[in-house]
Image (tube, rainbow, N blue to C red):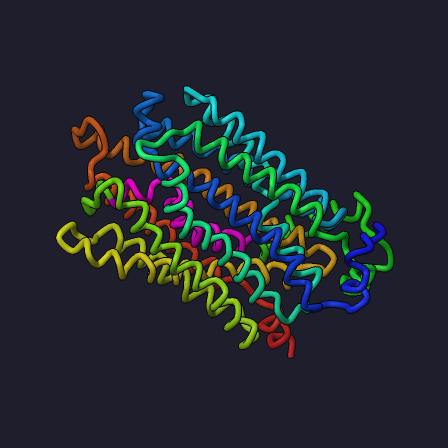
Amino acid sequence: MTKQPQRWRKIEAHGPGHPLAWVIWSVPAFFFLYEFILRIAPSLILPDLEKSMNISAGGIGAALGAYYYAYAPMQLVVGVLLDRFGSRKLLTIAAMICVIGLAIGAGVTHAAGLAASRFLLGLGSASAYIGAVYVAMTWFPHRRMAMLTGLTAGVGFAGAIGGEFLLQEIFGSPPEWARGMWILAAAGVVITIAIWIAVPERPVWHLERTGRDKPHDLRSVLHGLRAIAFHGPTWLVSLGCSLMYIPLAFAGNWGPRDLHSVLGIPVDQAPRMYALFYVGIGIGCPLVGWLSDRTGTRKPFLVIGSLFAALGTFLMALLPESASDWAWVVLPAWGLVVSTYVLGYPLAAELNRKDAAGTAIAFVNFVGMLVAGLIVWLFGVFIDAIASNRGHDEPVGSDFRWGMGILAGIMVLAVIAHLLVRTPLEASDSER
């Protein structure tokens, strides 16, 4: 175990739950907030990007999807590295990669350059959420696990809420892509330094909590990854949560344009209205985490949440333009039920070995981001194909409705996946 920096030794000696553990957690949580702003940035000026680069909806979807193509497979690597080395060095390097991706993005003029920039941003951002959750799992008592997992997610979605307004100021009007990228890169430099200063090495009592007598070596963490990859219940949780996550992938890339095309919301107002979806998620994640910890259950929330998340997607597809004011109610309610996906992380950790918790939660994120990347691309392909078949030169509101309806139908499968999961409590009851 690496020797602790002097400034954190008293906190380490205290054990889990020292008040200053909130400071240790807050910096990685802020990195996740920053990462989420980077994730949704293209949605703000999507029409301008399409015009300036002269590419179709399918083409821009493929370029933006590069973020997820890097983010998703890196989850497996991140989980292994966290269990092996801890979070301090990994999160610092990840933040630096984000800065490099933004610097490259500032000079792009074509789809290939945009895809390269988004790929690097996905590579760096891959550690943000899992790293913050891992820090919380390390420095707080396990009884707070679901609440802190939800609170971490809530912090990120707070970035999405304020991010829609902040990004409009950063990019300006009319939007200047290069200017925005450089400002975000400067913020990334500050976050990189803050992580290195504020996040300590893992405490000496970490091994005792995970049931190990010596630190992980590469062989042991890879053995943990193999066990998780061949664990059926973990796959069911991961698939269920990935399908529940579809609205988030949609929101970060297509959401504002969908509001404009389907409900006639003005282009400059659509991003601000869509922030209501993130309000629902930002409130729901810590709330459902707290309720789950209080009741000691995860599965019922996931089953009910996945059902209503699919219904919310159907409702957004069917909402008529004449009832566009109802979007002020539907969007936050939709976000509230989608937020239950966050319980998949603590559930996966509980279904696997304690010393492979980082790998378990990363595996859930891996499957979720992989599906998200496919959806970002496929949605563009869907609406291009639908528009073409219906004789439209470019997608219109009714084409977006059909695309949303397809997504909602796919999301229903999440209910089945979560129903099939056997939790530790159910397994012990069946053995009595």
Where residue 293 appears, as percent x and y from the top left, is: 56, 72
> In the rendered structure, does residue 137 fall within the stretch colored magenta?
no
Position of 15 with respect to 125 (left or right) is right
Residue at 50% over, 65% down: 286
Can you see residue 79?
Answer: yes
Residues in magenta, as a range: 235-259
Q: Is residue 149 left or right of residue 213?
A: left
Query: Does residue 6 lie above or below 63 as drawn?
Result: below
Residue placed most toward the observer, 196 or 398: 196
Residue that appears at 49% across and 27% down: 105
The number of callouts visible is 0
Q: Nearer the viewer, residue 94 or 311?
A: 94
Figure check: 291 above or below 63:
below
Say which quadrant the C terminus sits in: bottom right
Write down the quadrant of residue 187 in the picture.
top right
| Residue at the far left in the pictured view | 322
- Say above or below: 221 vs 22: above
Q: Is residue 75 left or right of residue 251?
A: right
Instruction: List x then y, in percent, for residue 279.
Output: 39, 58
The reply, left or right, for residue 141 in relation to residue 285 is right
Residue 136's quadrant in the figure?
bottom right
Main secondary structure found in the magenta portion: helix
Horizontal and vertical percent position of residue 218: 79, 43
Q: From where the camera sits, is residue 381 visible?
A: no
237 is within the stretch colored magenta: yes
Whole-percent x, y for residue 342 in the image: 51, 59
State the residue at coordinates (70%, 52%).
199
